[in-house]
Amino acid sequence: MDGPFFTAIGLILGADAGLLQIIGLSLRVTLTAVLVACAIGLPLGAALALARFPGRGAVIVLFNALMGLPPVVAGLVVYLMLSRAGPFGDLALLFTPEAMILAQTVLILPIVVSLTRSVVEDIWAEYREQLQSLGASRLRAVPTLLWDGRVSLLTGVLAGFGRASAEVGAVLIVGGNIAGHTRTMTTAITLETSRGNLGLAVALGIILLTLTLTLNALAWGAGQWARSRLG
Amino acid sequence: MTHTRRSTLLGFASGLAMLAALPASAQEFITVASTTSTENSGLFGHILPIFQQATGIEVRVVSQGTGQALETGRRGDADIVFVHARAQEEQFVAEGYGVQRFDVMYNDFVIVGPADDPAGVRATDSAAGAMAAIAAASAAFASRGDDSGTHSAEKRLWSAAGIAPAGEWYLSTGSGMGATLNTAAQVPAYALTDRGTWLSFQNRGPLEIVSEGDPVMFNPYGIILVNPERHAHVKAEQGQAFIDWIVSDAGQAAIASFTVGGEQLFFPSAQ
């Protein structure tokens, strides 16, 4: 009875304070990053779908490409920015949860922007004449378009959440994996692996997957509920 | 949007905002850049609570390879570096990045390898002899390859044996001690490791200690305050308090009392 699965159940039932703190921090960092990325990415993506300006194609390609930005590179760039020797060193943000939020926002933003752009572009193509006949300008149409595409957009937001909650490269560099302060689920898994505690590492992985699964189920359920309410 | 749904959304958003605004601990803290060997072995988990209880100062440890830890200090991202690569530490101080180096403790390096010992390392009587036997047999050897203190020690052993290791048998993992041991256990390969990480390492597979005890395997740790003249934000007072404590009788006793499986891992050496 000492497989990783039972270790995971034991950890959860034990409600170990250290583990709860790590789970809480992971959720706080990733959910905040998702929120910030949406606050910036949804309007930006919609604007990119509707606006016409020189170089628009290049910007779209850039955001599409940044979806493949390796987390460790995002982490390194944020590290160099926030380091005391870097341009924003005076903020003293390196090795804090805020630095991890920033790094994960950089990772999620391209996904939200690209997906929003694609979704809004499709809806705009479909309803353009209707909306324009109602007198809606491109700008005024943005909230309607975003609301109309909410189910597709939710998938993009979940993809962003998945990317952030699964990555270790960025949070390890900018957070430093400090016990009780910047240790997340993924950096704890990395640490336990390096200590040869493979069973504990897998158990933590099972807990992380369970959390991700729960959040996705909630989001899917909310989507279904909204659909049935609105018909 | 109906009223209830709007307030649900608002509640959700403000809940997230509260999550984001959870207060960071207000107490004073210092940041220590140290090595994976001290963190992975569990030493910090043992001694830091004792220090915090005595002084109220929280110590936040970022564990990296020695090369990266010194770079963190050079950039001013830590108040203290606590590492094990004497030559690099002295250079760090000489270049003005650190104030002064203090001896803290030592442990030693051991060579681990497959229990059946294909290179006949057990028959050798020195660390350099062991490395020579491994190279002569072209037996797999997993190297840190990451500029860490352990990697520096390994390079010194190769040069003492008059060997420039290269070839398919020489595996440069470019990763930490634990990851390198995980690799060595799978290949299986020989590897140089500090005793502390080895004793607390759980995934040994077929590996055993095959060479130990040569005085050149002695592995001293030093602690250095990052120079406040170079980085004005360095918490010199609290940092110095930590250094004073760790070289004091109380700090040295805390280090000596840390054991894994009944075996002492680090030996106090402050003067």
Image: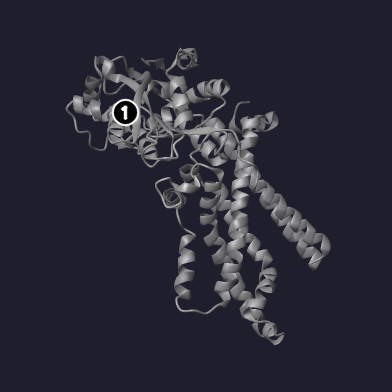
Most foreground residue, A119 or A38: A38
What x and y, as percent, mark residue A127? 67, 80
Q: Is residue B114 among what the camera can see? A: no
Specify the amino acid type for callout 1.
Ala
Kindly state the secondary structure of the residue where label 1 is placed: loop
Residue B60 % position (x, y): 51, 33
- Quarter residue A2 falls in: top right
Q: Quadrant of residue B168?
A: top left
Q: Is residue A194 rendered to the left or right of residue A20? A: left
Q: How is the image coloured?
A: one colour
Q: Residue furthest toward the bottom?
A: A133
Task: Give left or right: position of B147 versus A193.
Answer: left
Along the horizontal axis of the image, is A148 left or right of B59?
right
Q: Position of residue B201 (x, y in %)?
A: 46, 25
Image quarter (top left, top right, bottom left or bottom right) of the C terminus of chain A: bottom right
Viewer-proximal residue, B179 or A101?
Answer: A101
Question: Which residue is the site of mark 1?
Answer: B85
* Residue drawn at (64%, 65%) of the image: A152
Q: Residue furthest right?
A: B3
Q: Quadrant of residue B244?
A: top left
Q: Which residue sits at x=63%, y=77%?
A: A139
Residue ranking furthest to the left:
B162
Q: Nearer the viewer, residue B149 or A117?
A: B149
